[in-house]
Image (cartoon, grey):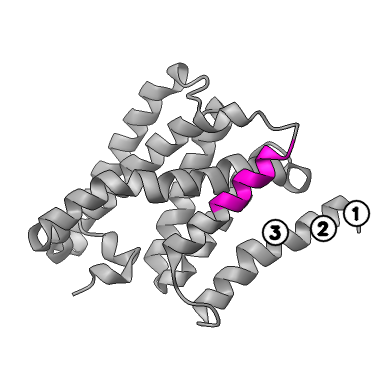
């Protein structure tokens, strides 16, 4: 089988087939264990690929020219998001902090380590490198990565998680593509993720937070 055809089959199986199996409960809905397993497999594949610079996984790379603009973009996006929650779902605003402040604090510090970094390794470093023959290295890759990132969130069975992750995935992919810095993409992702849990939208990304 030609490599491109194999990669296309692999892409459909991993990024479409597996989420659908979880969505229809043919597989258990265990996001973190599945994510860590996927990140481990991605790491092993990248380590065995001589064309991938493994140091990139722990490097800030060329982050300096992009940091200020990314932070300003994030502030603007998050202000609008918090205003949307305030006006359309005020009962959610800061609900996790009010209900379980220690849980919120644990999430705030642990989420970047056990969720953000594995996701960025898998959906940015691994995805951009492995599927470049399928999607190229330009806008096709940006949209493929963001759509795949959003689609896997169907496992949470709500449209908001999917929509926010498509948009977020596009932002994180732009950050990674522009800077080549996986850690800067992780910072970008962590800011958004921690903010979502802070303003009460975490329940759409993990069923355990629902009352």
At x 40% / y 56%, what residue is drawn?
Answer: 164
Q: Is residue 2 left or right of residue 175?
A: right
Q: Which residues are magenta?
A: 39-49
Give how far apart the Cα atoms at labels 1 and 2 are.
6 Å
Whether residue 53 is situated above or below residue 189 in the rendered picture:
above
- Residue 39 versus residue 16: which sits nearer the camera? 39
Q: Position of residue 88 (x, y in %)?
A: 21, 63
At x 21% / y 59%, what residue is drawn?
Answer: 200
| Circle 2 residues within 10 Å: few <14, some 14–19, many ≥20 | few
Whether residue 50 is situated above or below residue 89 in the rendered picture:
above
**Circle 1 residue:** 2
Q: Position of residue 163 (x, y in %)?
A: 44, 60
Q: Position of residue 101 (x, y in %)?
A: 11, 55
Q: Secondary structure at mark 1?
A: loop
Circle 1/circle 2 CB separation < 8 Å: yes
Specify the quadrant of the image occupied by residue 133.
Answer: top right
Q: Is residue 83 visible?
A: no
Q: Residue furthest left?
A: 98
At x 48% / y 77%, what residue is drawn?
Answer: 28
**Circle 3 residue:** 11
Specify the quadrant of the image occupied by residue 125.
Answer: top right
Q: Secondary structure at mark 2?
A: helix
The majority secondary structure of the magenta stretch comes to: helix
**Circle 2 residue:** 6
Indicate yes or no whether the magenta region holds residue 37: no
Give how far apart the Cα atoms at labels 2 and 3 are.
9 Å
Circle 1/circle 3 CB separation < 8 Å: no
Whether residue 210 is situated above or below residue 142 in the rendered picture:
below
Give how far apart the Cα atoms at labels 1 and 3 are.
14 Å
| Circle 1 residues within 10 Å: few <14, some 14–19, many ≥20 | few
């Amino acid at each position: 089988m030609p490599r491109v055809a194999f990669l296309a089959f692999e892409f459909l199986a991993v990024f479409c087939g597996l989420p659908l199996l979880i969505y229809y409960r043919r597989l258990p809905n265990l996001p973190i264990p599945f994510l860590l397993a996927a990140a481990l497999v991605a790491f092993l594949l990248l380590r065995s690929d001589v064309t991938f610079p493994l140091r990139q996984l722990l490097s800030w790379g060329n982050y300096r020219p992009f940091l200020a603009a990314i932070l300003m973009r994030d502030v603007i996006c998050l202000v609008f998001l918090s205003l949307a929650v305030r006006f359309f779902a005020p009962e959610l605003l800061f609900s996790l902090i009010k209900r379980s402040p220690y849980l919120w604090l644990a999430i705030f510090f642990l989420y970047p380590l056990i969720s953000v970094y594995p996701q960025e390794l898998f959906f940015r470093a691994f995805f951009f490198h492995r599927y470049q023959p399928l999607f190229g290295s330009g806008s096709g890759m940006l949209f493929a990565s963001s759509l795949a990132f959003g689609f896997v969130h169907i496992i949470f069975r709500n449209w908001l998680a999917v929509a926010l992750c498509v948009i977020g995935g596009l932002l994180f992919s732009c950050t990674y593509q522009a800077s080549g810095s996986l850690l800067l993409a992780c910072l970008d992702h962590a800011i958004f993720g921690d903010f979502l849990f802070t303003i009460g939208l975490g329940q759409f990304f993990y069923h355990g937070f629902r009352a």
